[in-house]
Image (cartoon, grey):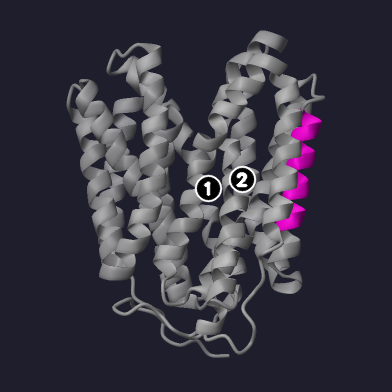
């Protein structure tokens, strides 16, 4: 493994660049008002664009994972970069919501999902000894994308207009993702990929997606991932509204919650990756769900002031960041790294469905009741996690 030390860190550099660019889609909220001002479209109709994007992002990871097994991560990441870039460039020409849904939502979202699995799963293969840590680096880079691109997007909208911003963003993402993809390659056959982090429960046998879904552990893992993502995505998507409606903050102060969440989300992704390598994935998940349930319960039952509000959303963002880091690592622990791209693509559907379920729950039950539901789901996840164990070696 030592003679490949420089190579595997070069892979990480490329992976980080790709993930940062993909994370730029989380600047979407910055486009809402400018699009309203230019076209007069309804806000809820504009926001639907991002929901379509996230849904396509999650859905396309299934096919991207299978494609990666056939043609390798470099080509898949390039394909994703091309699709995202083209989707954004076409969005600059959109004059109707349908066009925006297709260009940004369907094409752009598919591009993100196609490219997303390549850097993440490739890094996992190169670092069997530090899966949590390296997963944390990969997914935290995605989380930081919105912060890194935020100032650029705001400046472009101000100086070039909202449509031209899509054009510039598309060109930048296309070039940088294709550039970062050049370092992505699977380890050679003589590279040791069977090592695991000490103290982490694992099954060293490589399983196919079909074999994976035949185990009860997959369904338990999928459920707890789904429940946990509901909490995190609910807060991420509605943080500013919560601050204004429940805490009575000014729009400007409430907007700062978006930045706070982004920082704690990214920090949680990196920190929990390291922690899960030390104390184990299950213990990490138990702490994550306990923290989430407490924070959600506080938001539901206590009249929040500014301090309680920011503390609660920070706890939830930190935990959510940990969740999206630990689950890919535990998928590799349980089902091996050979087919991690396609396997995690299946598991990741929990994220996509949760992105749709969260807003539906909020719309039908109101904010306070939604927090209480999320707290209950986190407690259920804690209980389920106790019973998750590595699957017995699967038959070939």
In the displayed structure, does residue 279 sit left or right of residue 138?
left
Mark closer to the chain start, 1 or 2: 2
**Which residue in the protein does label 2 denote?**
22
The answer to whether residue 187 shows anywhere in this view is: yes
Q: Secondary structure at mark 2?
A: helix
Q: Count numbered badges in the picture.
A: 2
**Does the magenta segment cover residue 67?**
no
Q: Indicate left or right for 251 with 340 as reference.
A: left
Which segment did they paint magenta? Answer: 77-91
Does residue 388 sit above or below 319 in this rendering?
A: below
User: In what quadrant of the picture does the C terminus appear?
Assistant: bottom right
Q: Is residue 63 above or below residue 388?
A: above
CB under 8 Å between discs 1 and 2: yes
Residue 189 x, y percent position in the rendering: 64, 87
Q: Position of residue 143 (x, y in %)?
A: 48, 44
**Residue at screen point 56% across, 79% down:** 4
Q: Residues within 10 Å of mark 2 (few under 14, many from 20)?
A: many
- Work out how far the residue at label 1 is from the one at label 2, CA to CA, in angstroms: 6 Å
Membership of 82 in magenta stretch: yes
Q: Which residue is mark 1?
A: 142
Please tell me which residue is depicted at 72% across the width and 17% down the height of the picture.
160
Dot 1: within a 10 Å radius of its alpha carbon, few (fewer than 14), some, or many (20 or more) residues? many
Q: Position of residue 257 (x, y in %)?
A: 37, 27
Above or below, 116 against 32 in this view is: below
- Can residue 193 be seen here? The reply is no
């Amino acid at each position: 493994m030592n003679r490949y030390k420089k190579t595997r860190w070069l892979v990480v550099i490329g992976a980080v660049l790709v993930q940062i660019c993909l994370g730029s889609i989380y600047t979407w909220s910055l486009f809402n008002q400018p699009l309203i001002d230019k076209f007069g479209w309804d806000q809820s109709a504009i926001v639907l664009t991002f929901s379509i994007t996230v849904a396509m992002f999650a859905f396309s990871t299934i096919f991207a994972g299978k494609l990666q097994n056939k043609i390798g991560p470099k080509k898949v990441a390039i394909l994703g970069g091309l699709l995202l870039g083209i989707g954004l460039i076409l969005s600059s020409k959109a004059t109707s919501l349908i066009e925006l849904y297709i260009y940004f939502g369907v094409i752009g979202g598919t591009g993100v999902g196609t490219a997303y699995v390549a850097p993440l799963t490739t890094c996992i293969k190169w670092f069997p000894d530090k899966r949590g840590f390296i997963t944390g680096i990969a997914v935290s880079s995605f989380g930081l994308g919105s912060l890194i691109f935020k100032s650029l997007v705001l400046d472009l909208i101000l100086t070039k207009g909202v449509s031209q911003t899509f054009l510039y963003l598309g060109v930048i993402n296309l070039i940088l993702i294709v550039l970062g993809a050049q370092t992505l390659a699977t380890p050679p056959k003589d590279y040791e990929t069977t090592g695991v982090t000490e103290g982490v429960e694992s099954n060293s046998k490589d399983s196919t997606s079909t074999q994976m879904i035949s185990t009860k552990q997959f369904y338990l893992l999928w459920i707890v991932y789904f429940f946990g993502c509901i909490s995190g995505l609910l807060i991420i998507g509605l943080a500013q509204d919560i601050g204004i409606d429940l805490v009575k903050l000014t729009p400007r102060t409430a907007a700062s919650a978006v930045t706070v969440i982004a920082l704690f989300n990214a920090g949680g992704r990196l920190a929990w990756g390291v922690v899960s390598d030390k104390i184990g994935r299950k213990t990490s998940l138990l702490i994550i769900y306990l923290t989430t349930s407490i924070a959600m319960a506080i938001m539901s039952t206590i009249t929040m002031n500014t301090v309680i509000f920011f503390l609660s959303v920070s706890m939830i963002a930190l935990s959510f960041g940990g969740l999206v880091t630990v689950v890919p690592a535990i998928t590799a622990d349980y089902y091996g790294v050979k087919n991690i791209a396609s396997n995690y693509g299946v598991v990741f559907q929990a994220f996509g469905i949760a992105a749709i379920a969260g807003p539906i729950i909020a719309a039908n039950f109101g904010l306070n009741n939604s927090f209480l539901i999320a707290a209950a789901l986190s407690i259920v996840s804690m209980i389920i996690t106790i019973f998750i164990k590595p699957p017995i070696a699967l038959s070939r």
